[in-house]
Image: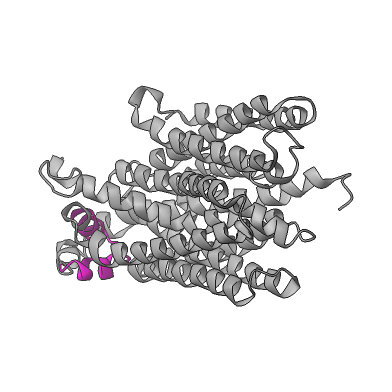
Amino acid sequence: MAEGNTRAPVRLEGKYGAMLVCWVLGNGCLFSWNSMLTIQDYYVALFPNYHPSRVLTLIYQPFALGTLAILAYNEAKINTRKRNLFGYTLFFIATFIVLVLDLATSGKGGLGSFIGICVISGAFGVADAHVQGGMIGDLSFMLPEFLQSFLAGLAASGALTSSLRLITKAAFDNSQDGLRKGAILFFSVSTLFELLCVLLYAFVFPKLPIVKYYRAKAASEGSKTVASDLAAAGVYKQGPETKDEHDPQQVERLNNKELLLQNIDYAIDLFLIYALTLSIFPGFLSEDTGSHSLGSWYALVLIAMYNVWDLIGRYIPLIKCLKLESRKGLMVVILLRSLFVPAFYFTAKYGDQGWMIMLTSLLGLSNGHLTVCVLTCAPKGYKGPEQNALGNLLVLFLLGGIFAGVTLDWLWLIGKGW
């Protein structure tokens, strides 16, 4: 078998540039949503009776899950370029509307404002389904480093927003209307960042030589989703011309059901990782950890620690000996994470803030590490169109886990009078 058919040319340019762009695009996929999560102290003060840290997440997830289910089912027919550009543009518009809504209402609470924020939360869910599934599917048939960079970018958005929130809290904490000033600054930065992602995906990413190579290769294996991106890069003809329509080896591909059955353990892995994580983060950490010496900083510090260690965890698989690739090993470690539930319960009840910070860090570290291990191991050995489809299916289970987690998160409120 010719090595050139399965491996990128050694001197193909743009690898590190593509990794950087993937990292920024990963950031953009969750930057707006993480901004909304990270300023929960502002929304809790603005809407004290509506449990915004839980309600906003619970609204976001059905929109994300429902939209992705439709997109994953029709994945083979969907134009990936239009899908991803629609997602990033929707993020940009929705984030800008958050800013406008706050300025228009002068930062006053009330049911009307809360409903507006909830609608925007749903729009973020729709945008996330377009971008996260589209990008992970697209990157699944390229280098694993691209997918790892995108996943690290997802986590980096949380770490960056947490850091920015700590800075704005320190800067505005003692000023009048300080929480609101910090929130406005937050969404101004988010709006500009989402605009950057739209421009990067539209004009920079498709023109990188290594990206063109992998998309042309996917087209030669029968992928129809990359045609617009190849056209934008000026190499539209490479894909269809290199594909032999009469070669059954190139046209035939496993359908979604067959792919899912072969990778059901990976799908369950992702579901369990995120069901467990989201049953604790951010709702439990925002509302149920009691009062400590850090005061109003406590929830922010916990969320920041989770985000930073989640980011670190996503880089650990780059060290080959630390990357967990055994399918059974992954399942065992993921099942062992269920011990976090009693650990958090008893630490919140009896432990001090040091133990809670350590537990939160471990939750983030394991979440990031295991996510990258599963999503980079699963696509190996498949053709480009199959890798794209599998990426979409795995993200569907990931979002299903998030939805289950935010629903289970409400169980912490039992016996608390709501």
Instruction: Place residue 228 in its image quadrant.
Output: bottom left
| Residue pictured at 51% horizontal, 26% vertical | 329
Would you say residue 228 sits in the magenta stretch? yes
State the image coordinates of residue 7 (x, y, percent, origin top left). 19, 43
| Residue pictured at 53% horizontal, 51% vertical | 168
Q: Residue furthest bottom?
A: 104
Q: Please say whether residue 305 is visible from this viewpoint.
A: yes
All told, the count of numbered labels is 0
Would you say residue 369 sits in the magenta stretch? no
| Residue pictured at 71% horizontal, 52% vertical | 407
Seen from the viewer's position, the closer of residues 194 and 100 is 100
Residue 231 vs residue 400: left or right?
Answer: left
What colour scheme governs how the chains and residues are painted in the rendered image of this protein? one colour
Question: Magenta part of the protein: which range?
Answer: 213-234
Q: Residue furthest front?
A: 175
State the image coordinates of residue 141 (x, y, percent, origin top left). 31, 50
Residue 262 vs residue 249: left or right?
Answer: right
Instruction: Place residue 43 in its image quadrant.
Output: bottom right
Q: Residue furthest left?
A: 11
State the image coordinates of residue 299 (x, y, percent, origin top left). 65, 42
- Main secondary structure found in the magenta portion: helix
Q: Please say whether residue 386 is visible from this viewpoint.
A: no
